[in-house]
Image (cartoon, rainbow, N blue to C red):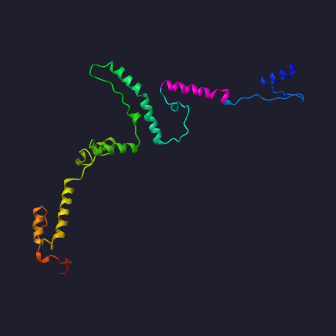
Amino acid sequence: MTGFKEKIKALTRGNRDDLVTGKETEYQQLQSDPSNSQFIATEQWAGVQICSIFNEDPVDHGLAAGAGSVTYANRSDADLARFKRRQFWVTKMQNVLSSFTPDGIAVKLNVSAALMMTDMERHELFKLRLDSKSITINEIRTLGDEESFGPEYDQPGIPDGTNAQEEIERQAVILQKMYLAVGVVITADEARAMAVKAGIDLGDYDPAQLGVKPQPAIGGGA
């Protein structure tokens, strides 16, 4: 047995000699997989415990990755959740820095980089603000580094249209109603007088030409 033990110890020291045993000897190799031999699971659990102490997401530090698929949207949600977890430290840092400033002056850290939204989230927010008339379209375009529209878009909310457009629509409605009423309850001259009174300029006309289809001019040679 002593000789067999010495042969095993020689092999584990890097000796390349062959191991020759009798047929009555049974040999079973002892081995361990890397996850057990390096205590990978134990190390990960220790890391997760440390993250829980400091209110950190283990995924941010390469631990306990989730099985869900990673998309831009849920990654953005995760970034926002990380900022909320660290808001405690941001507040404490602001308070400490503010203690070094004169009375009445407070330090506010710029956390806009941590609050970046997706395009969809940004447009939904702008839509809510436009509906509540708390922002103008030109202000939104300025935030997006885009050229502003005309001055009519400097008013909060979504403009209903320019004054010229409103006047055109008003005149169109009046003329449409008059067209239906002429020959039924009013005459053409009465309708024309009502249109002029409403501020609609119909121009001069020849009553004899009403209902006459215009004819193209006939050109002649010299």
Q: Using the image as rendered, state which of residue 132 and residue 19 is in the foreground.
A: 132
Q: Which residue lies furthest to the front in this view?
A: 185
In this rendering, position of residue 125 left or right of residue 56: left
Where residue 69 appears, as percent x and y from the top left, is 53, 42
In this rendering, position of residue 215 left or right of residue 91: left
Where residue 104 appears, as percent x and y from the top left, is 26, 22
| Viewport quadrant of the C terminus | bottom left
- Residue range of the region highlighted in magenta in the rendering: 35-54
Q: Based on the picture, tell me whether residue 174 belongs to the magenta stretch.
A: no
In this rendering, position of residue 159 left or right of residue 187: right
Q: From this view, report whether residue 183 is shown above or below residue 101.
A: below
Residue displayed at 74% across by 29% down: 31
Q: Using the image as rendered, state which of residue 21 and residue 176 is in the foreground.
A: 176
Q: Which residue lies furthest to the bottom in this view?
A: 221
Where residue 45 appears, as percent x and y from the top left, is 58, 27
Residue displayed at 50% across by 32% down: 60
In this rendering, position of residue 169 left or right of residue 88: left
| Viewport quadrant of the N terminus | top right
Residue displayed at 32% across by 41% down: 143
Q: From this view, report whether residue 216 is shown above or below residue 85.
A: below
